[in-house]
Image (cartoon, rainbow, N blue to C red):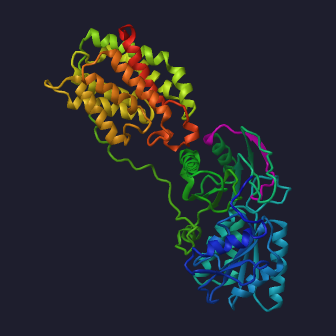
Amino acid sequence: MSQFINSRDTLVTEAIDGFLRGQEGQVSRLDGFPHIKVVVRADWKSDQVAIISGGGSGHEPAHAGFVGKGMLTAAVCGEVFASPSVEAVLAGILAVTGEKGCLLIVKNYTGDRLNFGLAAEKARAHGLNVKMVIVDDDISLPEDVQARGLAGTLFIHKIAGFLAAKGKSLDEIFCSAQSLIPSISSLGVSIDNCTVPGMVKDERIAEGMAELGLGIHGEPGRELIAFENAGSIMKTILSHLQSKMDNNQRYALILNNLGGCTPLEMAVLKEEIAKSDLASQLSLIIGPEMLMTSLDMHGFSLSIIPSSKLVTEALIFPVGPRAWPKPVSLIDPVMTDMPIIQTKEDWMSSENDELKLILQKCCFIFEEKEQFLNKLDSKIGDGDTGSTLAVAARTLKEELERLPLGNKKQFFEAMGELLSKAMGGSSGVLMAIFFSAAGQKLNDTLHWPKALEAGLKRIMEVGGAQIGDRTMIDALAPALKELNEGKTLFEVAKAARSGADATKKMPIAKAGRAAYLSKKALENVTDPGAEAVACLFEGLAGDKSG
């Protein structure tokens, strides 16, 4: 899979420097590239307890994105999904630890435990006061298997950073963190695994399945389950978390995007949380945001912690890192009164047998030409021109008895209303404008073809298309011109056909969907909208064509 990187060997160092260029000098790095990759607070005075975390890269914004006032003092970065070296961790400790000491916050992975643990021993040999906590918030695996550290680690980052900012001692911070870790629970799910740079993607999650409880390095999880929709998967995750919750306790929750979910998906997932039975127990929501990702993994995780006074105060405490979102409470969507939109659907039906027959024939033509127009449109568009017109035709047939056929002004206005609802996309809007403008222009002294020309002028103004731009205008404009000059229906149809055929030779489209296509793609293909206009007039001309 292609990715926007230069080399796997330089990926992390280039990413760190790119990140630092947007921090306005508030965050810096140790001059130890490529082996020592440590991001530190540039304003650090070593007058408080230092809070250090880190681990493999690929989890951005964790961990470097949380370095700043009120959170981490330093982040030690390894290569993608690889623990940083003992030397790198030690360098980070030595760079920021003063008399107050430092706390290492480590996720429960063997590499991190060993490298951070040995670095801590070496730092103590230098006379520094160093303590370490291990976060093991993953609840997906059996109890006899070592629990992993997931996004719940961020709770400890935030709380420890808050306590340090308040001037608490290392022992106090250590004891608070240590006591809170057992109460944190996290669980993740994904419908696609991540893509590790430079490696073949593991395609173990089949279409229609989701992996529950997988790790943030793409390692296998608890089980594969059937994936139906956002609601069902959220219900599953919440049921597992609920088993760890006290019904009489309120909780703070992190909704974490594992890297590949769109904002739309994450908003839907948040809505599912809000609709769940657990919503009443949630005091604060952090996210949805990318907080501790797994490269491009198409999944999310939830993390919870009981919301004591300390936890609440710590989580809402303002911090420097922009990656930490402001926690919010779940509130109902705010409603604003809907304005009353006046429509003209209360028109009075009236009869005009001649117009009724014409409309019935128009409907028949568009239904008959549906597949032909779709096939033509599929060459340069979505392949739905015929279907769009056929749907409008079927709707028009259903409404014929209600339409004000005996009053042309009201009829044009009614057609504008009807087509704006029956036809999809831009074509429906344009036709609605066409008939609405014609209806507004029509009066007792104006012949109806002139009113249609006014409608044409309006859609050219609004849509931006002109004659020669390779749109339906190229057929409609000459047809209406002939109509206004009193020509026969055969001559009108002939003008429409000539205009439609001319679009084949137009090298580029300057409006409509075809405007995004190359000359080669458009070569010798009639514009579907223009073709539809030509087909309509030819069908109406019928036996009169002679």
Q: Nearer the viewer, residue 72 or 283?
A: 72
- Residue 228 highlighted magenta (yes or no): yes
Q: Nearer the viewer, residue 546 or 68?
A: 546
Total number of numbered labels?
A: 0
Against 246, residue 498 (above or below) is above
Taking depth in this image into account, of 93 and 168 the one nearest to the observer is 93
Residue drawn at the location 32% of the way across and 45% of the way down: 337
Residue at 69% from the left image edge and 72% from the top image edge:
14
The rendered magenta stretch, by its main secondary structure, is classed as loop
Highlighted range, magenta: 216-231
Q: Which quadrant of the structure image shows residue 275?
A: top right
Position of residue 537 measured from the top left corner of the image (x, y, whole percent): 38, 19
Q: Is residue 451 visible?
A: yes
The image shows residue 119 at horizontal and vertical percentages of 82, 81
The answer to which quarter of the image holds residue 254 is: bottom right
Position above or below: 462 against 92: above
Is residue 343 visible in the rendered image? The answer is no
Q: Residue at x 71, y 87 (%)?
A: 95
**In this rendering, is residue 259 above or below 476?**
below
Q: Nearer the viewer, residue 155 or 210?
A: 210
Residue 311 falls inside the magenta stretch? no
Residue 216, relative to residue 26: is it above or below? Answer: above
Residue 159: quadrant of the picture: bottom right
Residue 330 percent across, percent down from the top left:
50, 54
Quadrant assignment for the C terminus = top left
Q: How far across and how far down the image is residue 45, in percent?
A: 61, 89
In the rendered structure, the answer to whether residue 371 lies left or right of residue 416 reads right
